[in-house]
Amino acid sequence: MKRNIVLFVAAAFALLSMASCNRKVEYQYNPYATLYHSSFTVSESAGEFNIPVLIQNATGADVQVAVKIDEGKALDGVDYEVISPANGILSFSGETDSLSVVVKIYDTFVGEFTGSKDFNVSISSASEGLSVGVITNARVMIDDVDHPLAAWIGSWTGEITGFFGNWPKAATTINISANPDGDPFTDLIVDGGINPYFQAAAGANPDYSAVVEGNQLIIASDQPCGYSDVVLLGFNAPDPNSADSYDHARFELQENGSLKLLNAYGAYTPSGGGFYEIYLGGAVFTKQ
């Protein structure tokens, strides 16, 4: 009798297990409206500029999304104008899950530096059954192309040589941008692309404050590299073997428009770890 009970229980368990394996689990996703990014940067000479609005998990139904444009330092009718939607409503058909707010950017002060200006785009409401979520606000920054340091600003590419041989030659991109909190006539920011070995080895990609003096860009030593206690140090000569003391890392803007690294620099640990890598001077970078 006991054996029959055991067999019955085992058979019932097997049937339950089979039913469980055959059960189809369905996940439900609710549709929602979102902006593509939370921030955009556009040149004041760009003309029309599109700001995408997306419907995620679209059901195929026709929906509407209300968008709102608010002035910041940029003024409506002076620095920009909303071309569409004219009524502030984006209407998505069942076959469409992406539409754009189209804004006309005006270069009102041609040849005059007035500084970067911004305005805000937001999703204010949506059709019934459509949520508003994820990214509901975006800041649009209009870059002034007449920046006094425009010759420096941009992406520069070249090959840099490592002193220790870890990177005999490394293709490197240096991004230079205006420092929004600094003096527009002297202050710039250089991203961590100037340190490819350390960036790859430690995953650090810091920004360095830099200043322009004449035709030279100067990055001060002792700025943190973004990882542990490692800092940036420069030498006073292109080759560290011929240098007696530390200096700033220096780049020079050449007459042909290229950018030249004047001296060696590297990532250094003041606590005694020494240099991770040193990059030799003489590298030339071309603006993209």
Image: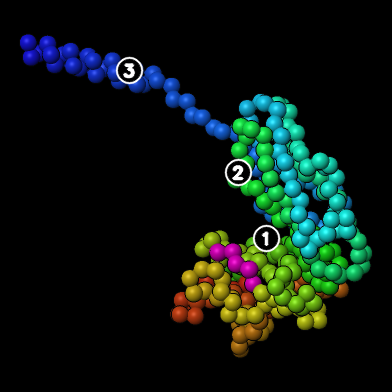
Q: CA distance from mark 3 to mark 2?
A: 40 Å
Circle 1 Cα neighbour tier, 10 Å, few/some/many (<14 / 14–19 / ≥20): few
Question: Which residue position is annotated with label 2?
Answer: 133
Callout 3–callout 2 Cβ contact below 8 Å = no
Question: Which residue position is annotated with label 1?
Answer: 171
At 86% across and 70% down in the image, what residue appears? 113
x and y, in percent, of residue 199 in the image: 57, 63
| Kind of residue at badge 2 | Gly
| Kind of residue at badge 1 | Ala
Name above or below for residue 238 compared with residue 31.
Answer: below
Question: In screen coordinates, is 4 left or right of 153?
Answer: left
Circle 3 Cα neighbour tier, 10 Å, few/some/many (<14 / 14–19 / ≥20): few
Residue located farthest toward the bottom when viewing the structure as drawn = 244
Q: Residue 111 sits in which quadrant?
A: bottom right
Q: Secondary structure at mark 2?
A: loop
First of labels 3, 2 by sequence position: 3
Q: Nearer the viewer, residue 88 or 159?
A: 88
Question: In screen coordinates, is 101 left or right of 173?
Answer: right
Q: Secondary structure at mark 3?
A: helix
Q: Secondary structure at mark 1?
A: strand
Q: Is residue 206 magenta?
A: yes
Name the mark on residue 107.
none
Name the mark on residue 18.
3
In magenta, the rendered stretch is 204-208
Q: Main secondary structure of the magenta part?
A: loop
x and y, in percent, of residue 49 in the image: 81, 49
| Kind of residue at badge 3 | Met
Question: In screen coordinates, is 161 left or right of 148?
Answer: left
Mark 1 or 2, which is nearer the eye?
A: 2
- Which color scheme does this rendered protein use? rainbow
First of labels 1, 3 by sequence position: 3
